[in-house]
Image: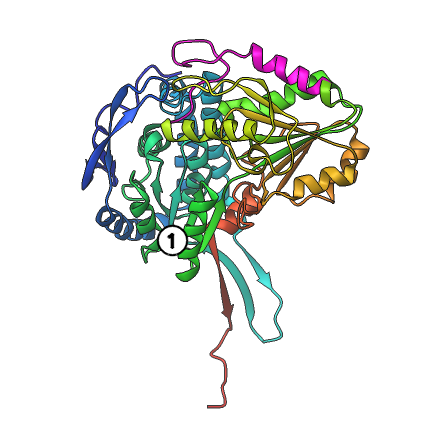
Amino acid sequence: MSTDEILGTDWHGKIFTGQWINGSGPAQPVVEAATGNTLGEIGAATVDDASAAAARAATAQKAWAKTTPAERAVILRRAGDLWTEHTAEIASWIVREAGSIPAKADLELGYAAQSCYEAAALPSHPMGQVLPSNEPHWSFSRRVPAGVVTVIAPFNFPLVLAIRSVAPALALGNAVLLKPDPRTAVSGGVALAKIFAEAGLPAGVLQVLPGGGDVGAALVEAPEVSVISFTGSTAAGRKVGESAGRLLKRCHLELGGNNALIVLPGADVAASASAGAFGSWMHQGQICMTTGRHLVHESIYDDYVDALTAKAQALPVGNPATEEVALGPIIDDRQRTHVREIIGKAEADGARLAAGGAGEGAFVPPTVLADLTPTNPAWTQEIFGPVAPVARFSTLEEAAELVNASEYGLSLGILGDLGMALDLVDLIDTGKIHMNEQTVADEGTVPFGGTKDSGNGSRVGGAEANIESFTEVQWITMRSQIAPYPF
């Protein structure tokens, strides 16, 4: 592993347009989530910066699309190597910015490397077909780069949720405009700019533009942009989708979730509680796939609540940069307030607080809310915090109805007998189903997405979905001589 730093300091107060320049907006502090300490500052783009970047990207993309598949593959493979070489440095930023424990930060770096290696194979995939025709000509289809792709990524997995769109889009010959969440602009923005520049990506093909909602809107609406890949809240995703629809642009939306874990009768309670604890409390529950609802068969309900409560009481909480902890901080004051309000409302509505609670400062402890009803706020809402709401069910049909009652359809876990689990699969509307695993899972080789308010059905991940997402189909015909016409 390299000991040379790659991030450096030249990004302080800057945005990346192929080089580090001053943004037109006021620089923003980079804040450590656990302490509130300032770690540096990041430049802020404006609407004008976004418009200029889109024009610059359109020019750079034309040259980039003409490079050979082998040239693009070399750069993506080199980027994959660089993520591995600089894991320790970049992981430390994920720990401090996002409040991640080191294991989660290392997971992000491993995913980033694998995403680049997978993307490196995309340029050599078949990019077309010979089509049947009733005309006396040859008929072909081919995949061509979409052009300029806007990627808008959130704070919770800042590297993973940027790289999973950035890498395949670049590999397929597109230019990318990346808007990271300002709260994690180093690990979710600066790091990508640095890695790809070091890997040899030409200037202007990837630009990093931290900014507010107005900058995001400008990067969606810019006429040079053909495709938008957005990961974030359902409310924000609706606005992005509305703009994209009005402008007839393709838009891939990966949005919120309120994911259920069904614990079947006869399931191993200790193993189930371990899975449920990980699903609800990994990264403080700040994951779209977090286990937001534990639905437990009445025959083992009390034992499960007891086991989950014991897990909560044993998990240490604190600053992951200085302590060995299982849970770190909630990202900021606004989100902490939201989580604490949901806990309070849930108790007021009759939930039993079995473990945890509001906590203090930047931290909310792992919390178990038992005996929930289907209308309890902790059951119906996406909490995005370390809260495990638990309710009981009697029959498989009742379990399916309770799961489907949510407006979300992102991920589902089912623990226990596979026969019963298979009986449930066809009854539930969701983008992902994991049998004998909890709800949080992703791999760079699989299509990822949700149904209902969890997304618009588009997918990113795996060769087939990535090619579909970041290329356009062009039809070509060819005759040996000019065709005769009656005019």
**Local crowd at mark 1 within 10 Å, few (<14), some, or many (≥20)?**
many
The percent position of residue 198, horizontal first and vertical second, equals 31, 30
Q: Is residue 146 left or right of residue 411?
A: left
**Front-lying residue, 131 or 5:** 5
Q: Pointer 1: what residue?
A: 147
Q: Is residue 200 visible?
A: yes
- In reply to whether residue 145 is colored magenta, the answer given is no
Q: How is the image coloured?
A: rainbow
Viewer-proximal residue, 328 or 250? 328
Q: Secondary structure at mark 1?
A: loop
Residue 84 place in picture, x, y as percent: 43, 22
Whether 327 is among the magenta residues is yes
Q: Nearer the viewer, residue 26 or 303?
A: 303
Rendered view: 462 above or below 330: below
Q: Most prominent secondary structure in the magenta stretch?
A: loop
Magenta highlight range: 303-332
Q: Is residue 186 above or below residue 35?
A: below
Q: Position of residue 193 (x, y in %)?
A: 32, 34
